[in-house]
Image (tube, helix red, strand yellow):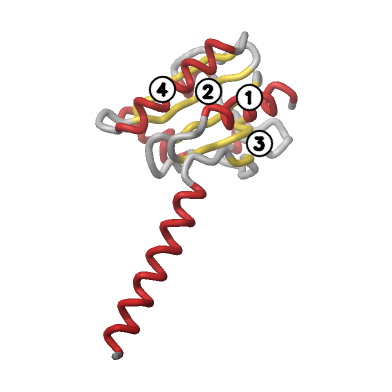
Amino acid sequence: MTGLMVCIAVLVAASAFGVWHQRRNGRLTVQKRKNLDDQDDGDGLPRLGAAEIGAELGERATLLQFSSAFCQPCRATRRTLAEVAGMVEGVAHVEIDAEDHLDLVRELNVLRTPTVLVLDAAGRIVRRASGQPRKADVIAALGAAVRD
């Protein structure tokens, strides 16, 4: 009987973790932590420039994607972000290979791929998603980045 109770407890815990992980995966959240103190302009949001990401920022916003070579969700995320960047004037999509930029990955606390950062025109990180974001969520995050 004790073994059955342990089995049920493990199944409940695993199910709860699965539900939590699925709800959190790909969700764009507001970025509030200071990660790049030397690049901070006083508003508490970390900033990235062309030197850090290796490409020019978009005029209105930038979709920055951290990927890895064998990441299947990274391919789908690349298509989604490229499509959104093509739809919205002044938005750039920049993809960074996480393995080639380990210092930036550590500095920004990127724990998995794909990780998407939404940067405003000044390079401030205003939204962040770990996992594959939905197209509607990316468009909404861009609206917040352009508005802010």
Q: Which amino acid type is shown beneath numbered disc 1?
A: Leu
Q: Element under label 4? A: helix
Residue 26 place in picture, x, y as percent? 49, 39
Residue 70 place in picture, x, y as percent? 25, 31
Marks 3 and 4: in contact by CB < 8 Å? no
First-in-chain label (2 vs 4): 2
Q: Which amino acid type is shown beneath numbered disc 2?
A: Leu
Rounded to the nearest angstrom, the CA distance separating label 4 from label 1 is: 16 Å
Dot 2 crowding, Cα within 10 Å, few <14, some 14–19, many 20+: many
Left or right of 58: which side holds 113?
Answer: left
Rounded to the nearest angstrom, the CA distance separating label 2 from label 4 is: 10 Å
| Residue at 53% over, 10% down | 86
Which numbered dot is residue 142? 1
Q: Which amino acid type is shown beneath numbered disc 4?
A: Arg
Q: Is 94 or 21 nearer to us in this picture? A: 21
Q: Which residue is mark 2?
A: 63
Rounded to the nearest angstrom, the CA distance separating label 2 from label 1 is: 8 Å
Q: Is residue 94 above or below residue 45?
A: above
First-in-chain label (2 vs 1): 2
Q: Which residue is mark 4?
A: 78
Rounded to the nearest angstrom, the CA distance separating label 1 from label 3 is: 16 Å
Marks 2 and 3: in contact by CB < 8 Å? no
Q: Is residue 97 above or below residue 50?
A: below
The quarter holding residue 147 reads top right
Q: Which amino acid type is shown beneath numbered disc 3?
A: Leu
Q: Nearer the viewer, mark 4 or mark 3?
A: 4
Marks 1 and 2: in contact by CB < 8 Å? yes
Left or right of 35: which side holds 6?
Answer: left
Quadrant in which the N terminus is drawn: bottom left
Left or right of 100: which side holds 60?
Answer: right
Q: Element under label 1? A: helix
| Residue at 42% over, 27% down | 77
